[in-house]
Image (cartoon, coloured by chain):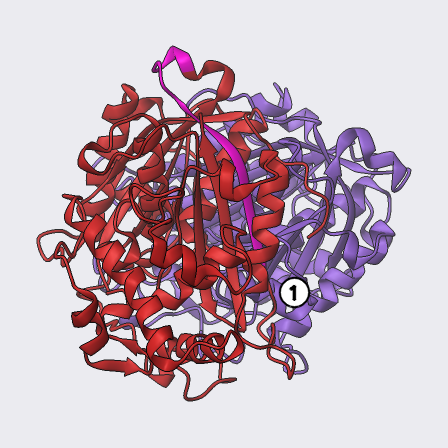
Chain colours: A red, B purple
Amino acid sequence: MGSVKGIRDKVAIIGMGCTKFGERWDASKNDLIFEATKEAVEDAKIEPKDIEAAWGGTWVSGFDGRCLADPLKLQYIPVTRVENACASGSDAFRNACYAVAAGAYDICLAVGFEKLKDSGYSGLPDQQSLPSNRYPDRTAPGMFALMATTYFSVYGLSPEEGKRMIGTVSVKSHHNGTLNPKAHLRREVTIEQVMNAPIVAWPLGLFDCCGVSDGAAAAIVVPADRAKEFRPDPVYVKALQISVCPSEGELRADYDFTQVRATVEAGKAAYTEAGITKPREEISMAELHDCFSITEAVTCEDLEFSPRGKVKADIESGFFNLDGGLPVQPDGGLKSFGHPIGASGLRMLYEVYLQCQGRAAERQIKNPKLGLTHNLGGIPVSNTVSVLIIGL
Amino acid sequence: MGSVKGIRDKVAIIGMGCTKFGERWDASKNDLIFEATKEAVEDAKIEPKDIEAAWGGTWVSGFDGRCLADPLKLQYIPVTRVENACASGSDAFRNACYAVAAGAYDICLAVGFEKLKDSGYSGLPDQQSLPSNRYPDRTAPGMFALMATTYFSVYGLSPEEGKRMIGTVSVKSHHNGTLNPKAHLRREVTIEQVMNAPIVAWPLGLFDCCGVSDGAAAAIVVPADRAKEFRPDPVYVKALQISVCPSEGELRADYDFTQVRATVEAGKAAYTEAGITKPREEISMAELHDCFSITEAVTCEDLEFSPRGKVKADIESGFFNLDGGLPVQPDGGLKSFGHPIGASGLRMLYEVYLQCQGRAAERQIKNPKLGLTHNLGGIPVSNTVSVLIIGL
């Protein structure tokens, strides 16, 4: 990364909203955008006409600024579409925050959304839908399975030990999802069920993969020094970092699939921007991009929550559980919400926002101060990654 | 529009680059991005590694941040894809400027690009490629032709008078293009050729329509107070405005197709941000979105260059010519460059930048102070519009 100056504590969130995620046959993408934004506007106690500019993050569910202007009937204000793979929602939020920090506007909206269930997208794209012909037979589960098998090998885990480690990640996230009325999948699973489920790409079984889903989430941001005019408990933006590698990325002989360098770099930059030196102690909770259970495990090392090669002990001791030292996916994660691509980044931020305000009901963690969100768009060798931190 | 605070004079351009536009069978989209950025980086006298964050504007020629990171080998810095129809390049620039004005970064890159000639895109989309089913038989020429015929009718021009008025626009722009080595079409045309050319959608003939083209353009921006560390003649950002209407837009009984409200609103906001009260006198030059000759004529009224209904006199007196009171399309416009969608906004800005620095060679205008760019994405009843102003 280059220099990190950043905009720590210059911008605050005064309202957020999130739809129920799932097979939303009842709703169009416009309905989802409206539903999330309505909650955010009401939460901020503003009127829709107070919104001065907006950013929409989506992968394939809309074109240009009209994709947000349409459902919200925004009239002649600036509306921008941002697309950055699985970090689209996070990056829409980041650009809205910069506009506020720049002094260009006082009240901005960021929305992330995606409608996939009726699009034909299965999560296992056929060759024609891939933007690159570099990896003709690749699938997402296949590429992340390489991460799992090489991680097991490099750190000396037997297949049984490795599978149990990642399975424990899924059991935890499924449990958290049962406590969340907005999650898509809300059933407990046992480690035995996870271990014995049909294999998608070994060692990743059905319960190691997140689902395909529909959803939207929204945030209203204002200058930090105005935030308490709107509500007594605003949540402040501490770090907004993106790290992108070229498509060749780490595709080279010495890449061992046990880490994602863009996550490492975005994490370091975010900690610098937020003034964090001991992430394991200072971060109160995290929503990580658990497209697969192995991704969550490796990301916990990439973000310095656990020492390199040692995440297994923290997973198995419950360190990442709701009542652990650093709860990961308190809302249930992609595992329980599925992954409507443009929506996930802002859905994660919604959970941090609620937790910081003490509004997370049954899944409320103790005394949260700072929460982190992480999105990984792409595959282990090539990706675009966001790490955002917000807090009190 | 809501309130206009803006970031006037907080950010400066220290380097720009632009490819030759045209049927670039010799170049991939990555080659075009590289070519434009190389010129910009050399012009700014920086190294590629000095770039701290980047924004890429494209409609259909790339996905996520990797679409820029790939060809430029950007390593683990933030790279965002912005898409806002024909204003994609302008909006990428706008977001880069906000990040600089926010204090998040010191040296940012914005690139607009599009590779259309080998994509199958003809400018006359078939129904399947349209994002909406609202106007099943519409084409861009057909919708802008309605603007021409109703403009003629409302302001009492005979078909002959109207066609001559818009034809004169094209003659002027073709002339300017002959002076520009980077333009796609570089031939003088006479008013007789324009009047007698094959009709695409009456009254718009072959020479009233811009072409389809390939190209890219790039800008390097820094905080205004650091600009003179890089070069003695930086060009400052005065206004960055976008105005978006919902898809229903002006589709109602009282809309008469003689103006584009989003242009009017974005123009007013930009003048407020830049502190301009008499655009006709204060704006030195403009690059307008002349997708069709009638669009340029109506935009001159929407932006208050000419009184409502009176643009004909200014067109025919040469007010918009290179040596006129307010040169429009000094570089030849979309008419001469074609319209590689994501590239056009930054191509326009490149011309203003060169003119402000006195580097426009044969087409240099006298003493430019402020230049305006305008992009219109969509059709007269529904669109996303940008108006940017830069200057000394």
- Vertical placement of A294 versus B294: above or below? below
> Residue A270 in the image: x percent, y percent?
58, 43
Could you tell me which quadrant the C terminus of chain B lies in? top right
- Give the quadrant of residue B286: top right
Viewer-nearest residue: B259 or A161: A161
- Number of numbered discs overlaid on the protein picture: 1
Look at 83% across and 50% down and name the residue there: B44
Locate the N terminus of chain B and report the quarter of the image it occupies. Answer: top left
Q: Residue at x 59, y 79 (%)?
A: A251
Residue that lies at the very extreme toward the left in this rendered image:
A26
Q: Quadrant of residue A382?
A: bottom right
Q: Chain of mark 1?
A: B
Q: Is residue A325 magenta?
A: no
* Whether residue B73 is situated above or below residue A333 in the rendered picture: below
Q: Amino acid at mark 1?
A: Val
Per the image, the residue denoted by label 1 is: B189
Q: Relative to A51, is B173 above or below? A: below
Farthest residue toward the top? A229
In the visual, does A228 lie left or right of B372? left
**Circle 1 SS class:** loop
Residue B233 visible: yes
Viewer-nearest residue: A125 or B248:
A125
Q: Residue A221 location in percent, x, y? A: 42, 28
Residue B271 location, quadrant: top right
Q: Position of residue A1 (x, y in %)?
A: 68, 53
Coordinates of residue A153 in the picture (x, y in percent) = 49, 80
Q: Residue at x 41, y 83 (%)?
A: A138
Magenta segment range?
A228-244
Please tell me whether residue A242 belongs to the stretch shown in magenta.
yes
- Classify mark 1: residues with Cα within 10 Å, few (<14), some (14-19) or many (20+): some
Whether residue B168 can be seen here: no
Left or right relative to B174: residue B288: left
